[in-house]
Amino acid sequence: MRHYKAFGLNIVSELELPSLILAPFKNADVWIKKGKVSKNGLIAPKRIRPFCQQAPSEIWLHVPGIARFYISQGNKVIVEPYEDADEQSVRLFILGSCMGAIMHQKNRLVIHGNAIRFGDGCVIFSGKSGTGKSTLAAALYQKGYEVLADDLAVIDEQLNVQPSYPQMKLWQDSAEKLGLDICQLNKIRLQIDKYAYPMDRGFCQKALPVKAIYVLNNHKNDQFLLQPIEGADKLPPLKNHTYRPGYLDGLGLKAQHFKLCSQLASRIQMTRITRPSHKFELDSLIENIEMDLHSKSFAA
């Protein structure tokens, strides 16, 4: 068994998870083990979708050719890999879909986005696939900013983002925009051109309060647009950019999730930033964000 620290949790895993930080501890919050997982799903599912079933405190997940997973009580992940499954894919789903399920079961708010340190707090960058949030986070990292989380920004009861692990995931075109040599990077799955970008420095291991969220969009115009999101209008973006929101209904957590979103919305500033889609001007995007944050008195 291996002992890791991630998302503010002590994790004991039978499977090796090399991207996580090893840490000594006595009491575990989460156990990850190999074992038998039902081929048919849960005994009494509340919500059934292709390859995924949910019930209060239980989630069953089937990734054909990779593994079946059973996640329960916010503290246990049982993994039954296929005999010929590649380890990269198994790990990817453990650290993504399974850990996202664990966090929902623990009543954490999980935003699908990247968290970057600014001063004594952090800013989350979220948005639909293709809006450039991972590319932006990696560019900020290259400029010397500290990263707390990539992909899963887990927010605890004190509305702090808990550090994940020192690695970002980048598509090949994003890596090339950033001047990275993909020959020096490992694929996160053998079947896709997405790469693990390890952080050998600049990973923030301290939980920090969320100060702001930027929702990234793009359009066909040449201008950058920054539009404040106020009041109750903050709730739809939080809902839309929650990680795996489909889990919530089956787990019976929609009311709790609304409460968490409301608490966060009342404490943070939120801005929609829209960039030109036909040219990804990273330097201009970062400059606009830095100017906006300084205008809100966020120290870098």
Image (cartoon, helix red, strand yellow):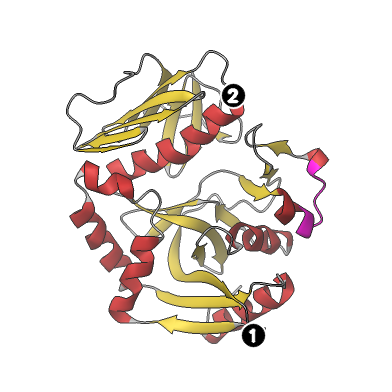
Q: Characterize the local packing of mark 2: few (<14), some (14-19) or many (20 or more) Cα atoms within 10 angstroms.
A: some
- In the rendered view of the protein, which quadrant contains the C terminus? bottom right
For the point 70% across and 78% down, the residue is 284
User: Which numbered marker is on residue 87?
Assistant: 2
26 left or right, relative to 81: left
Q: Label 1's element? A: loop
Q: Is residue 106 visible?
A: no
Q: Is residue 64 above or below residue 19?
A: above
For the point 62% across and 34% down, the residue is 189
Q: Which residues are magenta?
A: 176-182
User: Which numbered marker is on residue 299?
Assistant: none
Q: Which residue is mark 1?
A: 223
Choose between 59 and 102: the one closer to the eye. Answer: 59
Gap between marks 2 and 1 measured at Cα: 43 Å
Magenta-colored stretch includes residue 177: yes
Q: Amino acid at mark 1?
A: Gln
